[in-house]
Image (cartoon, grey):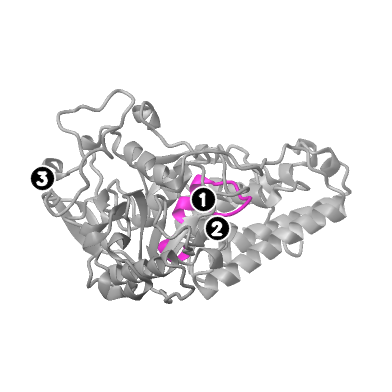
Amino acid sequence: MGNVLFRNGTALLCFGLLGISSRASNFQNTYSFLGCGDFRSQFFSSAYDLLRDGVSKSEAQLRIEASLNLSPSLVKNTSLAKLAPFQWLEVKNALSVLWKTTLYSHPEVKTFDSYEIYKRVAGAELGDSTTPERVAYNRLVDSAIKKVESVSNKLGITCEHRTEEMVKERIFVPGAGQGALKFFKVFYQDCQASDSPPFGPDHADLEGVKVIGRHPAGGNKRVIGDLEDVLRTHYHLKEGGEYGSQCFNWRQSPPIYDFGGKPYASSTHLNFFKNAGSGTSVLGIDCSAVVISALAAVGRRPKKDVAFKPDFVHNVNSSMLKEPQSNGLSCLTKASFSESDYNLKAGDILAISGHVTIVSEVGNDPWGLSRIFSVGQCNIDNFRTSRFDFKIIQSAPVKGAIGVTRMNAKDYYTNSGNQGKALRAHAVNACLAKFGSNSRANVSYLSVVRHKDESGCLQSPVPMEKQSCVSSCI
């Protein structure tokens, strides 16, 4: 049997669902997509369906085994049904190798962990190159996919389903800054969430949060230690049970900052009200999840000609966003300031390795350039974070670990902090551009990243659970 996987002496042949588990209800039959132009995308989608709900190694093997043991007569593809037995076996072998490579070959996942593999699979679809191990894994998976496609082509297997349609022409949808505000309203189930004054130094710290240890990736693990204190001091939660019948009542299970926390991703929706990710059992999401959710909310793809899948929120991290075009995020680019386009914009992403925020709103003078009258004044000593006129949405352990919040940039970034220094350096570059200078300082610590808003990078918004709660204002 050569390359076919084995489990307890049984050929482990690949893909589909034969009712092994109720959680496998969306697990797709890969045979149906052989010969199709979107086989790669459909394979990744099926991998997400297999992995997203915490499947065990043995259960994953059983599902794959049952799938590839499908009889040719049960596969709805007439070109497959015409294959000779030895040709059918060649297809099975190629698919088996693809699954073995996908599930077991990542150097950073030492033992079978479905969530870690799930994240790495999303990274492979996007092109996560933040570590040499991920680059190597991506190449192995891509090679195995190309082998399946090569076998399909050689055997004359034709596509018999409708392939995914990519948006090629520019469509006019709300910008990424509006996506940040839309996300914020849905997250807090409150149309007035973005109308309230930004959370800042004059507001009370969140109380009642307890640190219980360290996350393997480095941040603190937090839980709710005193529910009454959290409800009493959480700035963004409504008082007195004002949530409507279509809304999630946050006061029953309030969100806090959860390092590694993510929205639950189904094949179609993002859900902020169901625990997911590698954080604790609390509801709450981390910083990169906020940014990707904001892009999803207005149909901004991270990768050109690749449909935005909710599962991407589990892999795209701050390091990828800091260097988007080195990590497969071809719809994002570092902002390059010019004489006609030097200001910060709503929707811009501010990323360092370890944290990321998104600009939700900008004032008339976001960088504080109005005090500068000549190119000679474009030096960092003439810029102060206290003069920044823009707002950010982020998730961070600020002021008692409130998590998702909207803040004035001048209240979050400081002159002496590394992020503030880097933003002041970007302000210098914006200043130089304004006055027509071609000189630019190299700012390596923090990237200002912008969505390209071009053909192949736009699609319909990704639905969010409970968005009907705020349908009147999004």
Residue 247 at what x, y percent from top left?
31, 29
Is 319 colored magenta in this rendering? Answer: yes
Instruction: Point out the tag, 3 or 1, that comes first from the N-terminus.
Output: 1
Specify whether 184 is left or right of 197: right
Cα distance between the residues tagged 2 and 3: 40 Å
Amino acid under label 2? Answer: Val
Nearer to the camera, 297 or 31: 297
Q: Secondary structure at mark 1?
A: helix
Closer to the eye: label 1 or 2: 2
Q: Which residues are magenta?
A: 302-320
Side (left or right) of 89 relative to 44 = right
Q: Which mark is residue 51?
A: 1
Which residue type does callout 1 highlight? Leu
Q: Earlier in the sequence, mark 2 or mark 3?
A: 2
Amino acid type, callout 3: Asp
Residue positioned most to the front: 373
Name the mark on residue 121. 2
Expressed as whole percent of the image width and height from the top left, the position of residue 60 reads 55, 51
| Residue bearing mark 3 | 229
Q: Neighbour class for label 1 at 10 Å: few (<14), some, many (≥20)?
A: many
